[in-house]
Amino acid sequence: MSRSIALFGGIYSNHVALSRALEDARDRSADSVYCLGDLGAFGPQPDRTIDLLRDHGVKVMQGNYDNSIGNGLSDCQCGYTDPRDNHYARISYQYTFQKTSPPNRKWLGELPELYRFSMGGKRVLLCHGSPRRMNEFLFSSATPTHLLSKFCEDFDADVIVGTHSGIHWSRDLGNGKKFINIGVLGRPENDGTTHVWYAMLSENASGTEVEAEFIPLQYDHERLAEEMRSEKLPEEFVETIQTGWWTTCLEVLPMKERRIGRY
Amino acid sequence: MTTAPSFPSVALDCLDNLWFQVAGTLCNLTCNHCFISCSPKNHTLGFLDFETVKRVLAESRPLGVKEYYFTGGEPFMNNELPAMLEETLRYGPASVLTNATLLPEKIVNRIAKAERESLYSLELRVSLDGFSPETNDPIRGEGTFERAMQGVEFLVGNGFLPIITAMRSWRLEEEEEVIGKFTTMLKSRGYDRPRLKLLPSLKIGQEAMRTAGYTDLDWLTDEMMEGYDKSQLLCTNSRIVTDKGVHVCPILVDQAGSNMGATLAESTKDFPLAYQACMTCYAYGSICSNVSSTVTFE
Ligand code: SF4
Ligand code: SF4
Ligand SMILES: [Fe+2]
């Protein structure tokens, strides 16, 4: 049997989607599971996410959020400039910081920033935002192919995988190179549907190629919404979980991605 | 320029942003805050031709440019701009900084088609300094509000989500009210989810320098660069092409010494921050990226 690996993007404390994704990946006989960082933010009870990841032996990388919480920084390093976005970012950051146990914070601070392995004869590099910057947003309509090719060259990789921007996409770069953004488990993709996404990376039968499949994941989003309300998290965040439309952090979206959403 | 002991030097970390000053210093308007005093008669820098843009685009690829910007003067004064945008959108995302007063529907249709057929976004940043003729026209000129809004309507009608960019000319206490008025006005013109970007006024920059105690200094010093986040400065991640060559940043295009050569390759060396404008930059940080302030949800 050829190898396959489940790749989870930002969890944003959505432990309900995470536990569903762990089952789903097991049902698809994933050989191992990686999480590309941003465990906290947005959702409730951050320690539940961390415990689940550790209990299941998921190989976890550090995202900008984890870097901030782990090092006791004053914000999440998303770089929002809109006052309204900053207002909500601050609320969820403070909540997440307070609710993450000190040993878990320390653990977040010590996570690796990159992972490398080879698969299907390709050198695979996992990063959070981009290989050069943990908090770099890479959206499809704002990322030139030549930049992705340059990343492959500069970082000695054939396949680069990232998350951070919240919407999944991939691009064939020619010469057998690929970029894959696996999306996130934490919140839906601003398309009016409530499911979230992860990816399965597998090699072909002859072990000469590696392919990514994007997996839409339904989960009990009403349960998450309820929990968020009982934790008094912003109603705007709950709305996103229940409707599938982003209500905050829209300023980072380039025009094509923005046009798809409602706000 | 006086001889200061030594200026801090800044290296180009990565050429993320490549600017084209396609209309030089030529503009159909004469706004009173224009930082390079553009006008219909200012020929300090001229139109950029399509061939130069094509050559530089090809050169930009191996350098990993992330985003292409088109500015002036007023970029749409250059009749070759639509063709330049079509070409650029084969390489990556593009942004145009425009006053939107020279946007006949035919042109908007053409660039909208280019955007739809491209993998990449084409952002239009429209300068508007007030939410009404009474607040905008004293700054940007008689009749400019209506003409710009006509352009905005064509853009929105063609599927664009223009970023309305305003220089703050109001007091901080009035900010919320002004944003509300911009939003209401834009919605009444059919732009139902406006993207708004507010630029700091010069006063805020001066205030920042004053409170940091730099008012009596003319130049940046090495000491001031210690612990400073240099990525705030455009010269660490940008270059701009004019009809005269490749310059260090959009702010200094009309200054002697800012021209670093004829090709991108020649322009990648370090640059000494020997200009008073660098002081302003230091205090403001980058005011030129596209990230917009989104102000409205309902
Ligand atoms: S429209 Fe822009 S370039 Fe033209 S005069 Fe006004 S500020 Fe200057
Ligand atoms: S004006 Fe600003 S961007 Fe230009 S060289 Fe000086 S510091 Fe750098
Ligand atoms: Fe992130």
Image (cartoon, rainbow, N blue to C red):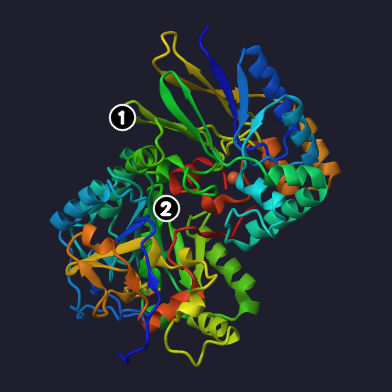
The foreground one among A8 and A2 is A2
Displayed quadrant of residue B133: bottom left
Q: Say if B160 sits above or below A84 in the image.
A: above
Quarter occupied by residue B70: bottom left
Q: Does ligand 3 reach within 8 Å of label 1's beta carbon?
A: no
Visible residue check, residue A161 = yes
> Among all residues in the image, which is located at the extreme front?
B5
**Circle 2 Cα neighbour tier, 10 Å, few/some/many (<14 / 14–19 / ≥20):** some
| Dot 2 beta carbon under 8 Å from ligand 1 | no
Residue A100 in sight here = no
**Three-letter amino acid code at the position of disc 2:** Val
Please give the label number shown on residue B55.
none
List x then y, in percent, for residue A120.
Answer: 43, 18
Question: What residue sits 69% from the left and 60% below the top?
Answer: A74
Q: Which residue is mark 1?
A: A174
In space, the residues marked 2 and 1 are separated at their CA atoms by 35 Å
The quarter in which the N terminus of chain B is drawn is: bottom left
Up the image or down, B32 lies above or below A49; here it is below
For label 1, the crowd category at 10 Å Cα-Cα, with few meaning under 14, some 14 to 19 and many 20 or more, is few
The three-letter code of the residue at mark 1 reads Gly
Q: Which residue is mark 2?
A: B156
Q: Residue at x 31, y 75 (%)?
A: B252
* Residue A78: image location, x then y, percent: 59, 53
